[in-house]
């Protein structure tokens, strides 16, 4: 039984997982990788543990003292003073218990509560700005929308198209990749071969009365989190248990999940009705190809399969040379049970995937030295299991120490790092986390996720996996078309080949009707088995041999078989290439980029906070605004001339000729991340303002578009321009300009 | 009842079509626009008619003479000489009849037959090259593919991405359009509102034994074409009938189509089994959104609806100003019954659509003068109905004469012309054909298709329609959200408003229980009806008035009603914008571009024909090849330096370091349309060869990338470079270089 693991999707559990940390689920199946879940059981933090203990002790003291007071009161003749003293003591203990509860609450909050609150507030500020300025729009909003579907509005669409253009430049062009473009509609057989038809599922429960569906693991996780955060009286055993459940959530079978839901008495969140047992729901959108209704098809859950099925043609196209990479950008689809987390978990999204095909015996990369010196946050398996956090490592060392499996994988990790930071992802909130053994498919050699930290936590945005030969082999088997490569030797090589010649005559005499089975079993021996048999036969003259197909062990004598090694000349080696797959969730990268680029600053009058997106020019949706300082004809005319020259230079821009104050017009474009503003305040020259520094330079009208083009093409920086042209301080300028 | 008409799809038949040329089908429905079909009944060509007549006459003469010979032979005593003379005459007549048949056959062939044969051969040559060089690949080929699904392989994908980048530059950037990006998965309600759920259908028939499905109109058309081409004995009535059937194919109802299939005895093409009656098959791929199975969804058949449902937000985003345009590039899906015509009719394709929203009272365009002088082939309705062909017209005149409905529509026609010819579409095989009245939806103001001629005939590649307010109104009605615009008057305008005040007291006395109905009917009068009533009441004192809801006519007296016009001030006008929609079938444009760019030329040795794609640099998949003349280290090193500088300049290129002859290497890149080859034949300078002229220039190594960039960015032409740098004639150079 084989499984595939693919980005975004889903961790398929390996069939040979017995060595992993966590319990192997009874039924092997595909589980969805929860973004927050780390698969290591978390020990309770020391402070939390002692605080819970303190609270329990205080509470016990309160209970004891309350008993004492009750006893004193019940006993006739107890002096009033004694009773009053006991009540005072009880009240003091109650105060102390209250304080202990508050301390515990505070500690829990700093893990989730109030920090979560401020993260939530930050996210709300970002999301409000994004929605108000149409970076995105809930799809089909006038029909009250569809969960998990979003449109990119004009600025969002421009950011996306800039990100994709840079992706093409950085990967496809730079590495001479073979880009392909395959349909989304995919026939069943392809996704049967890849494993998606059988295993691309999440476990679902239904409200038994309303039929409303929920993800079983989400309900269990929500219950445990709520208990941990809100219930201060939890015993330390219970705390450990709930934390363990969250940690192993991804590994629970349908039966185990169902049992936990029952044990905790979890009901439907909206109605409190009982829930069905969990059962797998396939996440692919199903459809039917052609009019007959007899050809089931699916909307692809990833773009990769389109590349794998074309391997043979692409290999020929590349002159039958390895390594080479194919790439594809396109839509992928997941019919999520109940989408959450806004733009991060959606039902349709853009993937950009690379399949780099390489000789499994040689995973070196000629350009590895270009990235070997890079240093960034890495989070290898060992550190995760030791409960440490990610730390800066030099990529070259990580590969040479064997932490990263091979140079090619390392090369792509480095290239992904450069790609993301170039876009504007904060390098301090970007880490490369290695998959734990239980996260990886059994055939995968190694796998690293580029994770970006945002208000939802660390989000998997790029998966970089060495998937070995799995995918090509799966399609070879299913289609009957060999998806293989050849290494032609410059001169023929001598190899030793095992030769097994059963003596049919002797075997026939001995085994009669069973002869055929025995012959086949003997011929199927591998080299080690055969050579062991040879040795035994030579020393003892006979050997016990188990014939599976007969279900019994027979005795083989020396005259029944000849085993030997022969020398042969071979002119080529035939093998299935390994594939190294960097897979980019474009929407997730863009959302994280929005969060990393967002900040607020006070307005001039300090009466409000203004929003800014600090996009680099490369990704900014619009590169500059053209603003006549005041609404007069001659400034409008100059603005039009400049707009025309910007269009000719291919620079996206908008013109703002409203009568609004210049400060407000700046604020409007800062809020959609326009990096430069060209203000027309004379008929010979203009000022260019940079968004974040608010610095301004004075440039002649003829040069304006050229200056913009140089910066946007990356030939010069704003700093170069500040040095080259006369400046005035932003504050000074804005004072002058502000109405 | 309303219908929509959309590009690629499908002509929806208007409900109020009684004035059109063609019979109105009994059941109104949506028909697929057959690419070849013109909707005008074609008169039989004069020569064909006379040839058919001549053949019939000769055949009759043969028959008569044969009778005569038979009679002579039967009559005893006829002299042998007389018989022989009659037989000679018969043989001569037979020869003449044979010649007449051949002439007719030849005439039919030039319409379809042998010309079709050579078109077919040309297409085969193009398609073979396209498939061999992986411009495209039948999708899921190793699983024997799926009809109507194709992958773009590396060069095809690069061409597509260049076409789309230029589209963005030419339309979105140049016109400051608002680009959006909406999902393919669409809930039912949206496509119910647009009319697709009910009417996006083709008529299908099933083989009654095997269940195989066919398009009913295709079978009927194939039958008629076959008859016309192959059956030389058709009567002229039959010829006219079959031609008429082909012409009106798109307008036949299910019943009419079924009757024709029965009348002609048409059976399933593969099995000759009987066919079912035709019935509508919805062409959308259906699926289900979410796990409940209760939310039907479809893969969008066009991208336009995503824009319409966002109109309100986009209008606000644009500062509540009209006109503005929104644009979208994305996948669209049609579950074709039986896809034919290779890349032209597929089940999934990329559309690029523009929705330009405009005040219905002002469809002028400020930039119309930029395109008014353009002259190209136009094919207005009148010319089509008169049986003429397309002829060159000046766009400005077409608009001023009212042939094109308005300036905005005209502006887009001009911009589409510039777009297509810039890509490399041959302007002599491009025409703009106006829709005939029966092709247009009843609400459409005007519609023109950019049609490109290729081996399949004239293919609709871009539809440019003025769709009036239909789409926004449909979604307003369905969603309850008004999708409207406001014109704020600079100063309030005085308007006259009709005021009708029925006297309830008098009416009550007269009509008792019917009073309410009468009051409502009176209040519902339009201005003309009310003013007519006022006049009559003033002259005669009473008037007959029909109350529909009562089903009777009553008499209204002067004292029962007061009617007058009051002056009111209005501050704004509220209206539903019109939309002008240019919609581009990217795959069709690319396929036509392939055909228009393809040519062959003899190899040096004149022993074979070499294939060339003459793509302009703008769309060429790869801009240049770098080839060391011979395989030596120092040339390889120079090639690497040049490759690096090309990458830095963002110029896509490939390196060909195989030992193959330079001529063969040139031929290899000519075949995928690489416009320039940089041949490394020294360590200081290189030669650059242009693909079509084979001209070569000598350029220093440092300048190579700059020269390429200047040409590819369109700042200079090859001609400029030939003038600037030393050249040698292609022949001379290739002689030198050829091994």
Image (spheres, coloured by chain):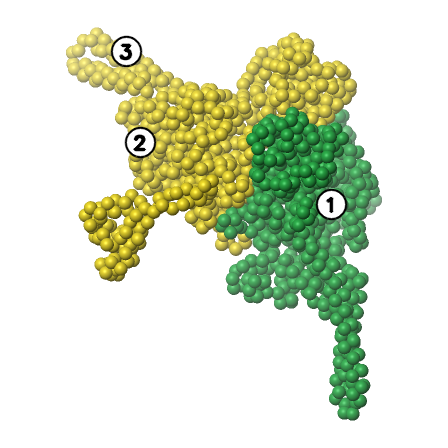
Chain colours: A yellow, B green
Give the alpha-carbon distance from disc 2 to disc 3, as whole Å.
47 Å
Give the farthest residue toward the bottom: B77
Q: Position of residue A574 (x, y in %)?
A: 43, 44
- SS for dot 1: strand
Q: Is residue A79 left or right of residue B541?
A: left
For the C terminus of chain B, the quadrant is top right
Circle 3 residue: A92
Chain under callout 3: A
Q: Which mark is residue B430?
A: 1
Q: Residue at x 62, y 67 (%)?
A: B265
Circle 2 residue: A21
Callout 2 and callout 3 share a chain = yes
Q: Which mark is residue B16?
A: none
Q: Position of residue B544 (x, y in %)?
A: 76, 49
Chain under callout 2: A
Q: Residue at x 66, y 59 (%)?
A: B221
Q: Residue at x 49, y 38 (%)?
A: A322
Q: Is residue A283 left or right of residue B31?
A: left
Chain under callout 1: B
Give the alpha-carbon distance from disc 2 to disc 1, as whole Å.
67 Å
The picture quadrant where one finds residue A466 is top left
Give the alpha-carbon distance from disc 3 to disc 1, as whole Å.
94 Å
- SS for dot 2: loop
Depth check, mark 3 against mark 1: the one in front is 1
Callout 2 and callout 1 share a chain = no
Picture layout, residue B479 above or below residue A599:
below
Alpha-carbon neighbours of circle 2 within 10 Å: few (<14), some, or many (≥20)? some
Q: Position of residue B483 (x, y in %)?
A: 64, 36
Near-viewer residue (A413 or B333): A413
Q: Is residue B353 visible?
A: no
Q: Residue at x 81, y 86 (%)?
A: B82
Alpha-carbon neighbours of circle 3 within 10 Å: few (<14), some, or many (≥20)? few
């Amino acid at each position: 039984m084989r499984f595939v693991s693919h980005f975004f999707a889903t961790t398929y559990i390996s069939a040979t997982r017995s060595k992993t940390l966590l319990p192997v689920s009874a039924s092997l199946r595909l589980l969805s990788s929860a973004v927050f879940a780390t698969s290591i059981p978390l020990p309770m933090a020391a402070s939390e543990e002692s605080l819970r203990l303190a609270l329990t002790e205080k509470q016990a003291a309160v209970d004891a003292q309350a008993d004492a007071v009750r006893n004193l009161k019940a006993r006739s003749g107890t002096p009033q003073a004694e009773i009053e003293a006991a009540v005072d003591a009880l009240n003091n203990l109650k105060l102390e218990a209250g304080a202990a509860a508050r301390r515990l609450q505070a500690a829990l909050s700093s893990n989730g509560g109030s920090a979560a609150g401020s993260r939530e507030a930050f996210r709300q500020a970002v999301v409000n700005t994004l929605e108000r300025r149409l970076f995105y729009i809930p799809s089909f909003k006038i029909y009250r929308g569809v969960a998990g579907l979003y449109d990119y509005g004009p600025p969002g669409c421009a950011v996306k198209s800039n990100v994709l253009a840079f992706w093409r430049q950085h990967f496809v062009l730079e590495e001479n990749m073979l880009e392909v473009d395959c349909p989304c509609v995919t026939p069943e057989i392809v996704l049967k071969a890849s494993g998606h038809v059988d295993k691309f599922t999440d476990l679902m429960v239904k409200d038994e009365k309303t039929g409303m569906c929920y993800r079983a693991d989400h309900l269990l996780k929500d219950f445990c989190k709520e208990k941990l955060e809100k219930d201060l009286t939890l015993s330390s055993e219970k705390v450990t248990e709930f934390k363990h459940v969250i940690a192993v959530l991804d590994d629970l079978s349908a039966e185990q999940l169902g049992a936990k839901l029952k044990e905790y008495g979890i009901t439907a969140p909206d109605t409190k009705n009982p829930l069905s047992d969990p059962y797998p729901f396939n996440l692919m959108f199903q459809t039917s190809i052609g009019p007959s209704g007899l050809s089931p098809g699916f909307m692809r859950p990833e773009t990769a399969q389109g590349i794998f099925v074309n391997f043979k043609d692409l290999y020929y196209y590349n002159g039958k040379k390895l390594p080479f990479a194919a790439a594809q950008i396109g839509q992928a689809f997941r019919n999520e049970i109940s989408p959450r987390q806004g733009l991060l978990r959606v039902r349709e999204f853009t993937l950009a995937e690379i399949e780099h095909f390489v000789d499994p015996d040689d995973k070196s990369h000629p350009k590895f030295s270009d990235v070997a010196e890079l240093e960034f946050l890495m989070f290898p398996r060992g550190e995760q299991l030791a409960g440490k956090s990610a730390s800066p490592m030099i990529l070259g060392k990580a590969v040479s120490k064997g932490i990263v499996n091979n140079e090619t994988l390392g090369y792509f990790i480095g290239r992904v790092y450069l790609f993301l930071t170039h876009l504007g992802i904060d390098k301090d909130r970007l880490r490369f986390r290695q998959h734990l053994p239980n996260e990886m498919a059994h055939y995968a050699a190694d796998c690293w996720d580029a994770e970006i930290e945002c208000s939802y936590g660390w989000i998997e945005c790029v998966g970089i996996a060495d998937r070995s030969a799995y995918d090509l082999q799966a399609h070879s088997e299913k289609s009957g078309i060999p998806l293989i490569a050849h290494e032609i030797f410059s001169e023929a090589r001598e190899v030793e080949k095992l030769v097994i010649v059963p003596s049919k005559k002797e075997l026939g005499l001995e085994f009669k009707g069973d002869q055929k089975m025995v012959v086949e079993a003997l011929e199927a021996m591998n080299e080690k088995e055969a050579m062991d048999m040879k040795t035994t036969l030579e020393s003892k003259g006979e050997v016990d041999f188990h014939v599976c197909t007969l279900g019994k062990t027979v005795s083989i004598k020396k005259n029944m078989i000849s085993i030997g090694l022969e020398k042969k000349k071979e002119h080529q080696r035939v093998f299935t290439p390994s594939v190294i797959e960097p897979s980019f969730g474009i929407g997730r990268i863009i959302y994280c980029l929005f969060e990393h680029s967002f900040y607020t600053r006070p307005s001039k009058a300090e009466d409000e906070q203004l929003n800014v997106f600090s996009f680099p020019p490369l990704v900014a949706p619009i590169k500059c605004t053209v603003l006549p300082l005041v609404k007069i004809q001659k400034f409008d005319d100059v603005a039009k001339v400049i707009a025309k020259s910007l269009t000719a230079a291919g620079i996206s821009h908008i013109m703002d000729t409203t009568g609004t104050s210049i400060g407000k017009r700046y604020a409007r474009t800062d809020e959609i991340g326009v990096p430069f503003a060209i203000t027309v305040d004379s008929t010979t020259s203009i000022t260019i303002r940079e968004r974040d520094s608010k610095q301004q330079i004075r440039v002649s009208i003829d040069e304006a578009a050229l200056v913009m083009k140089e910066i946007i093409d990356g030939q010069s920086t704003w700093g170069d321009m500040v040095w080259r042209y006369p400046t005035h301080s932003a504050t000074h300028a804005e004072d002058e300009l502000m109405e």
